[in-house]
């Protein structure tokens, strides 16, 4: 019985030793191969958040749109410029409203007419009438017509802000003086003012202008380049 007991104890001791040796071997294998017990799965990448709330502008697309708009604007400006140039060509009325004359009876264009205004004296004394010479020259190729009447070729006398006299006061159609002007041939007419004041409402007046300094003005569709004249009454 003692022999059997010793055999059992020896068997238990051997089993314990085998188990201990096996555990040690497993630990040593794990220590030698650290990746053996690690997770082999790769970490998942975070999901793509997609476009943000403020995406960058498509500069290429915007740039093309701006270029197209600029080209359209330039084309429009070119068309306007061409239209303006065409409106100023010969044969067109332009800003005057008078077309190029085709016959002697047609009205002259202002740009073809040169007017000069000359006073007989700088100072008129002793109650003398004031005399003014108007000379009109047609510089166009075509003979044309100008109304030399007192309304269309108005002479106005002023003193400061005071309107003293005008040839257009009470003028009507019967006072028209259509005159044909050939190219380069001057036409001269003389206008006389007896110093009597006139009124646009055609009232009768026997008042005369007193001594002093006055300004003579030419008012007409053809008044471009005509200077005012200063004179004195004594």
Image (cartoon, rainbow, N blue to C red):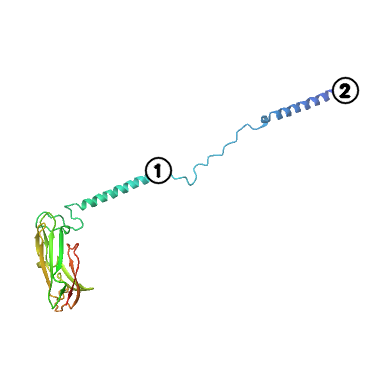
> Is disc 2 placed on a helix, strand or loop?
helix
Q: Which class describes the residues within 10 Å of circle 1: few (<14), some (14-19), or many (20+)?
A: few
Q: Could you say which is closer to the camera, residue 110 or residue 105?
A: 110
Q: Is residue 229 above or below residue 211?
A: above
Asked if residue 82 can be seen in this view, the reply is: yes
The residue under label 1 is 61
Image point 24% across, 52% down: which residue? 84
Image point 21% across, 50% down: which residue? 86
Give left or right: position of 69 versus 13.
left
Q: Could you say which is closer to the camera, residue 6 or residue 54?
A: 54
Which of labels 2 and 1 is toward the front? 1
Q: Is residue 22 above or below residue 230?
A: above
Q: Is residue 21 above or below residue 63?
A: above
Q: How far across and down, in percent of the image, does residue 173 sit?
A: 11, 66
Q: Could you say which is closer to the camera, residue 4 or residue 190?
A: 190
The residue under label 2 is 6
Residue 106 disc label: none
Q: Quadrant of the N terminus?
A: top right
Q: How far across and down, in percent of the image, does residue 59 sit?
A: 42, 44
The residue most toward the right is 2
Q: How far across and down, in percent of the image, does residue 206 sit?
A: 14, 79
Quadrant hosting residue 188: bottom left
């Amino acid at each position: 019985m003692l022999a059997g007991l010793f055999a059992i104890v020896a068997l238990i001791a051997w089993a314990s030793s085998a188990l201990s040796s096996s555990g040690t071997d497993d630990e040593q294998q794990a220590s030698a191969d650290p990746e053996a017990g690690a997770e082999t799965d790769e970490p998942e990448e975070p999901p793509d958040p997609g476009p943000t709330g403020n995406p960058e502008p498509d500069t290429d697309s915007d740039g093309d749109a701006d270029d197209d708009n600029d080209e359209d604007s330039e084309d429009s400006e070119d068309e306007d410029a061409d239209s303006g140039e065409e409106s100023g060509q010969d044969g067109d009325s332009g800003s005057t409203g008078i077309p190029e004359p085709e016959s002697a009876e047609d009205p002259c264009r202002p740009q073809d007419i040169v007017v000069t205004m000359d006073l007989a004296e700088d100072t008129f004394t002793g109650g003398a009438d004031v005399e003014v010479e108007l000379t009109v020259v047609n510089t166009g190729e075509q003979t044309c017509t100008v109304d030399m009447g007192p309304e269309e070729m108005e002479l106005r006398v002023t003193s400061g802000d005071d309107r003293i006299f005008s040839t257009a006061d009470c003028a009507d159609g019967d006072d028209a003086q259509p005159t044909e002007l050939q190219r380069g041939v001057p036409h001269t007419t003389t206008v006389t003012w007896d110093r009597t004041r006139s009124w646009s409402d055609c009232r009768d007046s026997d008042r005369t202008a007193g001594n002093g300094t006055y300004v003579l003005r030419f008012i007409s569709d053809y008044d471009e380049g005509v200077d005012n004249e200063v004179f004195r009454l004594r």
